[in-house]
Image (cartoon, rainbow, N blue to C red):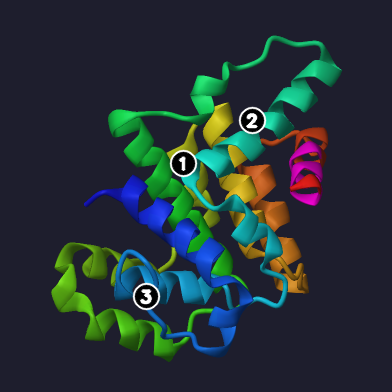
Amino acid sequence: MDFSQLLNQVLGAAQKGGKAVADSPLNSFGGGALTGALASMLLKKKNTKKLVKAGSVAALGFLAYKGYQNWKQNRQQEELPQSAFQPAGLIGENHSRVILQTMIAAAASDGLIDDAERAAIERESGSDAETAAWLQAEYAQPASIEQIAASVGSDEALAAETYLAARLVCADLSRKEIVFLSRLSQALNLDDQLVESLEKQLELA
């Protein structure tokens, strides 16, 4: 399956749907009902403005790059090139898979995934069986923080994007979300100042 396409469709659906989807969680958006079910799950938060602002994988990568760049400049250290935040081919697919897993795990951290979303996936599974099976597995058992960190490894660009993706979903910053984000940043070995820089990019978005 094409994880990059799925992530782009989900972020694009979020951008088009906005907060309106929260009142109709099973609506379908561009990219099909499976995409709509996932987008609606992520948009059920009260504060979805930042998720809507992301809009695409490229936009998410740019936000992460700017946060990373500002952090490195303040530390006067060598920076990663912007291309590291826009990977292609198999590397790009891995990036997108990890980011999708992180967004689902972030949603699950506050009990956001419910039977309605699972039912929507099952109902539409015939339209894209492979994607439906993957989503069902992720819904049933979201990736743990340790699994996410293991997938990211030492990739600084992916670590920054992964945290940013989780933060976009954890828009309300409930107690459980704060705990999740704190544990995630530690598992990804993110410097506290880098986390602050990423947060600032969201404020400016």
Question: In the rendered image, which residue does mark 3 sit on?
Answer: 140
* Residue neighbourhood size for the residue with mark 1, other residues' Cα within 10 Å, grouped as few (<14), some (14–19), many (≥20): few
State the extent of the magenta-drawn residues as a range: 197-203
Would residue 63 be visible to someone looking at this image?
Answer: yes
Circle number at residue 65: 2
Tell me which amino acid carries mark 2. Answer: Tyr
**Whether label 3 touches label 1, CB < 8 Å:** no
Expressed as whole percent of the image width and height from the top left, the position of residue 148 reads 48, 48
Whichever of callouts 3 and 1 sits on the residue coming sooner in the sequence is: 3
For mark 2, does the 10 Å Cα neighbourhood hold few (<14), some (14 to 19), or many (20 or more) residues? many
Could you tell me which residue is drawn at 32 percent across and 88 percent down? Answer: 119
Look at discs 2 and 3 and give the one toward the viewer.
2
- Left or right: residue 6 versus residue 72 is left
- C-alpha distance separating marks 2 and 3: 32 Å
Residue density around tag 3, few if under 14, some if 14–19, many if 20 or more, within 10 Å: few
Q: Residue tagged by mark 1?
A: 150
Q: Which is the main secondary structure of the residues drawn in magenta?
A: helix
For the residues marked 3 and 1, what is the alpha-carbon distance in whole angstroms?
A: 20 Å
Say left or right for 26 vs 176.
Answer: left
Q: Is residue 191 left or right of residue 86?
A: right
- Is residue 154 in view from this perspective? no
- Against 69, residue 187 (above or below) is below
Of the residues tagged 3 and 1, which is closer to the observer?
3
Q: The disc labelled 1 sits on which kind of residue? A: Ala
Q: Amino acid at mark 3?
A: Ala
In the rendered image, which quarter is residue 47 located in?
Answer: bottom right
